[in-house]
């Protein structure tokens, strides 16, 4: 009897210890909303910790697409202190790690759990707002980054805007030109759909309040920029009463190779150009066009999956030693040019921590101005680029103007 009593007491003590013991706190828990933004119980699914490479049991019910996202998208939805039973609202923060980047940053993004739920709901049309009270909206291309490459129309519209809804990859120099209210889209990897819904809410608020809204998009609005999708949504929100204006921008498809010294057409080397993106709708992987001799391929928004992209290209018939030229942050002061081939591109991007925005040029024409006898694989020093930059001419022109 005494032994049984002692054993029972020990078991009770162990249970209390397990309940009351301090829980280890990890900053690296991964959460992912279900399609509706929350799970059926109103909570966000706890899926994965950074230290683990395996999905826990609680994630097995998710559809395969979400499982794939977890494995490759470096975004963490982490609950902060608060929530049920604490008397304080539970907030959500997202830790974002740039692909192939040595540094990480933590950004407060979409606010409370209820905000996430609200973002998932369709925005009703502005049928209660009279035509005369509705605002105006324009989709404006910001070009690759240098303010000097903005169109005259873009500069004028930015000066007139009440609200500018800006892609996060638009350069700081262009963001600083905004005189009205600046809202920066939170399109981090894995958050693009939520961020897009928030953009639509910002548009709706501006139109409802009669504001002059500018949707400022890196490059050109209709070149992998969801431009047409946004025009359709504006049409739905306004029930056809607001027609969006569109201002072209200098697309990185053409500007980045040029500024990096990588031609995409060259007689005898490339007579055609194929343009692709790294990610399709709902995180799908776009199909690769099979290898064609004397054709250049240009990819936007693909630097985060360049290793797999290289393998896919080889599988489609591209030779292993096909030249690759990567232009990072084209036209900006941080611009870098990396030379590689399909076998080495992924490793060199990782070695040099190449970050978006970056444009990838694949094909013989890209190295027409970079003879292999003079240029090895790796980062090309700016002073060795085969072209001079236009900045020098602008500086000379400015000095001549001052002298006059």
Image: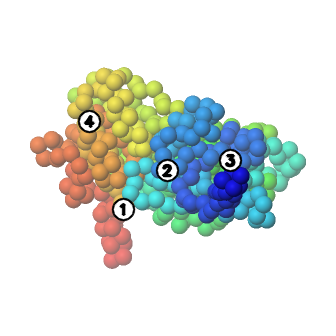
Residue where numbered disc 2 is placed: 50
| CB atoms of marks 2 and 4 within 8 Å | no
Residue where numbered disc 3 is placed: 44
Secondary element type, mark 4: loop
* For residue 230, above or below residue 313: below
Secondary element type, mark 2: loop
Foreground pick, 182 / 81: 81
Residue furthest to the front: 1
Residue furthest to the bottom: 403
Quadrant, the C terminus: bottom left
Left or right: 343 as drawn, with respect to 53: left
The residue drawn where x is 30% and y is 57% is 389
Residue where numbered disc 1 is placed: 333
x then y, percent, for residue 20: 67, 62
Graded by Cα atoms within 10 Å as few (under 14), some (14 to 19) or many (20 or more), the crowding at tag 1 reads few
* For residue 322, above or below residue 209: above
Residue where numbered disc 4 is placed: 343
Graded by Cα atoms within 10 Å as few (under 14), some (14 to 19) or many (20 or more), the crowding at tag 2 reads few
Graded by Cα atoms within 10 Å as few (under 14), some (14 to 19) or many (20 or more), the crowding at tag 3 reads many
- Kindly report the distance in space between the C-alpha atoms of the residues bearing marks 3 and 1: 41 Å
């Amino acid at each position: 009897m005494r032994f049984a009593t002692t054993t029972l007491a020990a078991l009770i003590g162990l249970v209390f210890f397990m309940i009351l013991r301090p829980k280890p706190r990890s900053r690296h828990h991964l959460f992912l909303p279900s399609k509706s933004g929350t799970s059926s119980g109103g909570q966000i699914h706890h899926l994965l910790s950074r230290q683990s490479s395996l999905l826990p049991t609680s994630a097995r019910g998710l559809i395969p697409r979400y499982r794939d996202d977890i494995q490759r998208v470096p975004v963490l939805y982490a609950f902060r202190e608060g929530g049920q039973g604490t008397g304080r609202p539970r907030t959500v923060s997202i830790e974002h790690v740039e692909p192939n980047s040595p540094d990480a940053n933590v950004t407060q993004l979409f606010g409370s759990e209820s905000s996430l739920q609200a973002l998932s709901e369709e925005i009703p049309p502005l049928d209660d707002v009279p035509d005369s009270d509705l605002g105006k909206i324009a989709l404006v291309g910001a070009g690759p980054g240098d303010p000097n490459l903005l169109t005259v129309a873009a500069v004028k519209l930015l000066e007139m805007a009440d609200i500018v809804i800006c892609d996060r990859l638009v350069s700081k120099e262009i963001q600083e030109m905004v005189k009205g209210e600046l809202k920066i889209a939170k399109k981090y990897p894995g958050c693009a759909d939520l961020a897009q819904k928030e953009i639509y809410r910002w548009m709706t608020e501006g139109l409802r309040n009669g504001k002059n809204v500018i949707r400022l998009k890196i490059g050109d609005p209709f070149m992998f920029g969801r431009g047409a999708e946004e025009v359709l949504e504006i049409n739905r929100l306004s029930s056809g009463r607001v027609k969006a204006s569109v201002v072209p921008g200098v697309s990185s498809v053409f500007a980045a190779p040029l500024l990096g010294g990588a031609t995409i057409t060259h007689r005898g080397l490339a007579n055609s150009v194929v343009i692709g993106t790294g990610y399709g709708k709902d995180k799908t992987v776009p199909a690769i066009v099979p290898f064609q001799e004397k054709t250049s391929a240009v990819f936007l928004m693909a630097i985060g999956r360049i290793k797999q992209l290289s393998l896919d290209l080889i599988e489609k018939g591209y030779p292993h030693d096909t030249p690759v030229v990567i232009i990072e942050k084209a036209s900006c002061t941080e611009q870098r040019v990396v030379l590689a081939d399909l076998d080495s591109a992924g490793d060199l991007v990782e070695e040099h921590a190449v970050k978006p925005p970056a444009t990838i040029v694949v094909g013989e024409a890209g190295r027409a101005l970079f003879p292999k006898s003079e240029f090895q694989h790796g980062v090309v020093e700016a002073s060795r680029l085969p072209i001079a930059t236009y900045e020098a001419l602008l500086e000379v022109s400015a000095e001549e103007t001052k002298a006059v």
